[in-house]
Image (cartoon, rainbow, N blue to C red):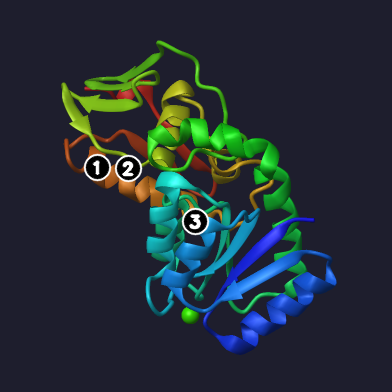
Amino acid sequence: MAHILIVEDEEKLARFLELELLHEGYQVSKTGNGREALQMAQQGDYDLMLLDIMLPGLNGLEVLRRLQKENPVPAILLTARDAVMDKVAGLDAGAVDYITKPFAIEELLARIRVALKLHGTASKTNTAQQSHAGAADAPGGKELPEEETHRWGKLALSVKRHQVTYDGQEIALTNREFQILKLLLENQDIVLTRDVLLNRVCGYDYVGETNVIDVYIRFLRSKIDEMYQVKMIHTVRGVGYVIKSESVK
Ligand code: CA
């Protein structure tokens, strides 16, 4: 049975989660300290972590980042309400999902089942091989075709080199920003809905909030549209986003 590490410093919540998970038949360990969590995750063999962000010792995001380098353990973040930036930072640091407190235990259990299915032992070797890419790859480890370059005006996205340049200048993007930009560039003049972007970038079973996509789009705009004074990503109100080939200057 899957072994789950609970990292939560609110004792009542941690205890409640422990009992529920034991009841479901999972093997459970827990700690309320970030530094101890890092140590346990480095040394143990966990299938999944439930990771609070605000922790004594070391915060949850830092635990994730440090683990990502050597021994990534799939993590579901337990975040505070409306902490969108935490969610985005967490997903970029390699979390596979997040859930906002307070949550219904049934919902968390459902997400745990999905995360274990997508990121269970079978996919672990795959993740380890791809870890040189730095940031987390989308669940399912989608294959990228080689030697592919997408262009929009002076912007070029090289799939093989995982690199984006504008007029020869490199733009630093996180993995998910890169994936979203790639999808929009591949589908120029086609409006992509938030759901489509979310599914393609975060995985089909992703059950988080779609406004995460808006946050990534905002980052992309600040790094490209605002930086180079172009209008690349258009919002189609109530639908989604599109890059229009005709708007290239
Ligand atoms: Ca906490």
* Pointer 1 residue: 223
Q: Specify the amino acid type for callout 1.
A: Lys
Label whose residue precedes the other's in the sequence (2 or 3): 3
Kindly state the secondary structure of the residue where label 1 is placed. helix
CA gap, disc 1 and disc 2: 5 Å
Q: Position of residue 55 (x, y in %)?
A: 43, 77
**What residue is disc 2 on?**
220
Q: Nearer the viewer, residue 224 or 44?
A: 44
Task: Name the residue: 34% across, 21% down.
Answer: 161
Where on the picture, by quarter, is residue 10?
A: bottom right
* Kind of residue sitting beneath label 3: Gln
Figure check: 164 above or below 94:
above
Q: Residue furthest top?
A: 147
Image height of 103 relative to 152, above or below: below
Q: Quadrant of residue 65?
A: bottom left
Mark 2, Cα crowd under 10 Å, few <14 / some 14-19 / many 20+, is many
Determine the residue positioned at 60% across, 44% down. Answer: 195
For the C terminus, the quadrant is top left
> Would residue 176 be found to the left or right of residue 21 on screen?
left
Q: Are marks 1 and 2 in contact (CB under 8 Å)?
A: yes
Give, as a three-letter code, the residue at label 2: Leu
Marker count (numbered) = 3
Which mark is in front, 3 or 1? 3
The residue sitting at 28% across, 27% down in the picture is: 164
CA gap between label 2 and label 3 equals 33 Å
**Observer able to see residue 53:** no
Question: Is 56 located above or below residue 185 in the figure?
Answer: below
10 in relation to 66, above or below:
below
In the picture, the disc for residue 42 is 3
Q: State the quadrant of the N terminus.
A: bottom right
